[in-house]
Amino acid sequence: MSRIVVVSNRVPVPAGNSGHAGGLAVALLGLMQRRGGLWFGWSGAVTEETGPPAFSRRGAVGYATLDLTEAEHRGYYTGYSNGVLWPMLHSLPHLMAFRRQDLDTYRRVNQRFAHNLAPLLEQDDRIWVHDYHLFSLPGALRSQGVRNPTGFFLHVPFPAPDAAAVAPGIRSLVQDVLASDLLGFQTASDRDNFAATATEFAGAVRTGDHQLELGGRPIRLGVFPAEIAAREFAATAAAQSALEPARLLARSLQGQSLILGVDRLDPTKGLPERLEAFRRVIARRPARSATMLQIAAPSREDVLAYRRLRQEVDSAAGSINSEFGEPDWLPLRLLARPQTRDTVAGFMRLARVCLVTPIRDGMNLVAKEFIAAQDPSDPGVLVLSRFAGAAAQLSSALLVNPHDAEGMAEALTCALDMPRAERLERWLAAWEAIAGASPEGWGEDFLRALAPGDLAGLPAAGSA
């Protein structure tokens, strides 16, 4: 069986017996442990000078990591990846901050990854490159003479050609990523947007739903929605609901309906718009009938747009609590620090409503986790942005436009007042959409499609 070589921006090298964080890392590690694999990428360290890869091993998985210099981190990671590509891919061009030297550094780091990875490859390896930080890597590997089957998966959305064009350098990056044999996306819309961009910018020809052709070479396209281990998460949520963090939260509610939000503090998550919708709801309902817990862990605090967002969210939360709060009660509880996944599972079990309202999102696994966490006899309601990838599978949620605060307020009111029979019907439809899937199944689907052969291994457009 061929070895899997995963390449990602960050490598989750395990520390001692602490295990792994879950999600993508667990899914990929499960595959790699069975097959034998190599995980290659940035160590997370910033050093004064570049050096060769550092190697470690745990079980059947080898880890090869490179450090970045301060200039590389500033240009490749903070500058171009998160200052240009991230806002462009999420259709937020006003947040872009472009410097030509950052694009040059981005390409050089991708080339350095390829230069250090190529000597480590074996003849029958299958290479799986992850996400927008490494758009240039497939082309850089080909320039190193690598001919192994190479797949690329984009975890975030891909916009229409006109929106993609606002990012300086995107044309060359599309050409680079087209050196892959298989390109995977979260939704059919993302796949089609990329295909349209490739035909307009790179001279590719679309020869079918699942294929492009460039210079006589076929490039396969697939839709692979990221999944969770729904049954495992359901068991975790049920167990956590009896433990202290969830019990303390439940006691503090005193019969109020809990509205829950769980996000990184990121401009793509629509937090200011969500808080405005909550403000409108709380203004119309009796005091103490509902309370909102918004977990918003800070991220990318070295990026100006993120620091400004923190100030905006703090200000909005303070305004809501000062306007509607009472001496012994606050309508909004804002936690700007991360909580463990298990603890959040217990909170989800308690929630009457979960607000997942990103401006744009590749998938958003929080939506799927909330569905899995519910008590099947008395489930809560998911209010979901129609611009999250998860909306394609969870169409029984209350779908909203995250730019429309009044529309979100109406949906939130509907969710709070929804009768049990309708909650059960909506939850069951969503549960059936995710219960049979798993993260490892997602990975296996991609790797089967990457194996040499025809297009039969590709999922149908929009399928789970």
Image (tube, rainbow, N blue to C red):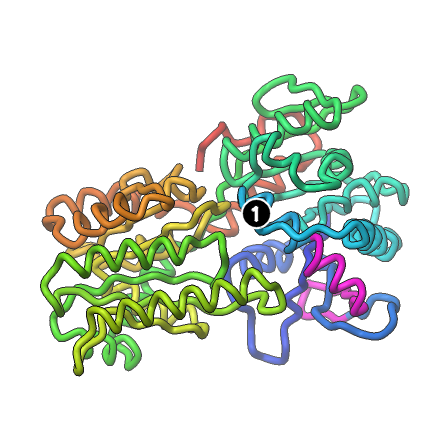
Q: Which residues are magenta?
A: 56-80
Q: Is residue 4 at least partly visible in the picture? A: no
Identify the residue position indicated by label 1 in the image.
94
Q: Residue at x 25, y 59 (%)?
A: 279
Q: Residue at x 33, y 47 (%)?
A: 384
Give the quarter of the image for residue 380: bottom left
- Relative image position of residue 439 (x, y in whole percent): 49, 51
- Relative image position of residue 55 (x, y in whole percent): 79, 69
- Residue kind at label 1, given as amino acid type: His
Above or below — where is 463 with respect to 44?
above
Give the number of marks.
1
Give the quarter of the image for residue 78: bottom right
75 is within the stretch colored magenta: yes
Residue count near mark 1 (Cα–Cα under 10 Å), binned few <14, some 14–19, many ≥20:
few
Q: Residue at x 33, y 72 (%)?
A: 318
- Nearest the camera: 240 or 246? 246
- Relative image position of residue 267 (x, y in whole percent): 49, 56
Q: Is residue 415 left or right of residue 385?
A: left
Q: Residue at x 60, y 18 (%)?
A: 208
